[in-house]
Image (cartoon, rainbow, N blue to C red):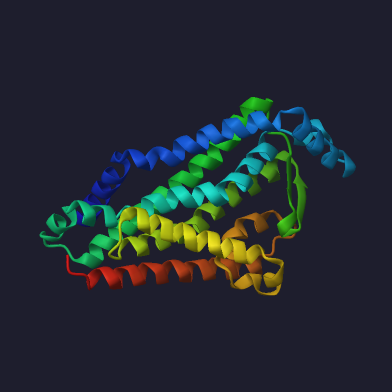
Amino acid sequence: MLALRQFLHELFKLFARKRSYIGFGAFFLLQITLLFCLQLPKPKQEISQLLTRNGLMFDEYYQGLTLAIVIIAFTFTLLGALYVALVGGDIVAKEVEDGTMRMVLCRPISRLRLLTIKMAACVVYTILLVLFLGVTALLISTIYRGGLGKLFIYISEENLFAFYDTAPGLWRYARSVMCLAYSTIVIASLAFMFSCFNVKPAAATILTLSFFMGDLVLQNLPYFQSIRHYFVTYHFGFWVRTYHDPVPWHAIGISVVYLTALTQTFWLIGVARFCTRDL
C-alpha cells in the first residue's frame, strides 16, 4: 500500500513539471502541420499516383487510417525519442541536482525501491505519450478527412506495401500503437540509466539521444545491411512489421525478447551505479 502511494506521488511529481507536457503539445501541433502539408497539391498528387498505379482507389484509402499511420511513422522515430529521453534523463538526475534526493533518502526506504518506482513512472509516461499520439493522430485525421477509410501503408526500408479494409486496418493500427509503446520503453530505460550516473539531466538526455541516433545511422548504412539485426533501432521498429501479411511472429518475438533484455539491463546498470553513489 505504501509503495502504491509512493508511486502515485511520483507520477504527481512527474506530471507537475511543465516539461513533461512538451511532447504532448509538440505532437499535437506537428500532426496539424503535417496534415496541412499532406493536403498540398504536390504531395497529394504523388500519393494518388502511388495508389492508382497499384489499383487502389484514392478516395477510399486517403483518409483517417492511412494519414494517421503516416503521421506516426514519420514523426515518432526522432521526436518520440527526444521527449521520452527528456523525461527519463530528468527523473533521477534532476532530484540529485536540486538536492531533494538526499531528503528523500533520509526516510526509511531503500534505493532499490525508490528507483523501481521511478522507473515505473517513466514506463507509464512513455505509454501515455505513445497512446496520446496514436489516438490523436487517428482522431484528427478522421475528422479532417471525414472518415476512417481503408488502411494503406508503404515503407520502403521495411519492404512493406500493404492495404486493408477498415475493420482489419483499425485492428492492425491499434496493435501497432501498442507495440510501439512497448518498444519505446527501451529508450526510457536508457535515459533512466544515464540519469542514475553523476551527470546533469541535460547530459543524460543528450547521451541517450546520441546513442539512439548513432545506432539509427549505423543501422541504415548499406554496408551493415547483413548485420542489421544487431542494432537496437532495427528491433525498435518491430511495430511496423505487424502490418506484414502474414505477420512474421517469429522475428517479432525475437525483437520483443531483445528489447526486454536491453530494458532490464539498462535498469540494472542504473540501479547498480546509483546504489554505490555517495550523495
Placement of 203 over or under 142, stated as above or below: below
Which quadrant would the N terminus be assigned to in this image? bottom left
Identified at 51% across, 61% down, the residue is: 212
Residue 169 visible, this orientation:
yes
Residue 153, x across and y down, in percent: 73, 47
Identified at 42% across, 56% down, the residue is: 206
Residue closer to the observer: 160 or 146 = 160
Residue 137 falls in image quadrant:
top right
Residue closer to the observer: 200 or 3 = 200
Left or right, 240 with reference to 14: right
Residue 139 visible, this orientation:
no
Placement of 101 over or under 148, stated as above or below: below
Which quadrant would the C terminus be assigned to in this image? bottom left
Total number of numbered labels?
A: 0
Residue 95, x across and y down, in percent: 23, 53
Residue closer to the observer: 172 or 189 = 189
Identified at 70% across, 71% down, the residue is: 223
Residue closer to the observer: 207 or 175 = 207
Residue 21, x across and y down, in percent: 39, 39
Identified at 60% across, 62% down, the residue is: 217
Placement of 56 over or under 125, stated as above or below: above
Residue 31, x across and y down, in percent: 57, 35
Left or right, 15 with reference to 102: right
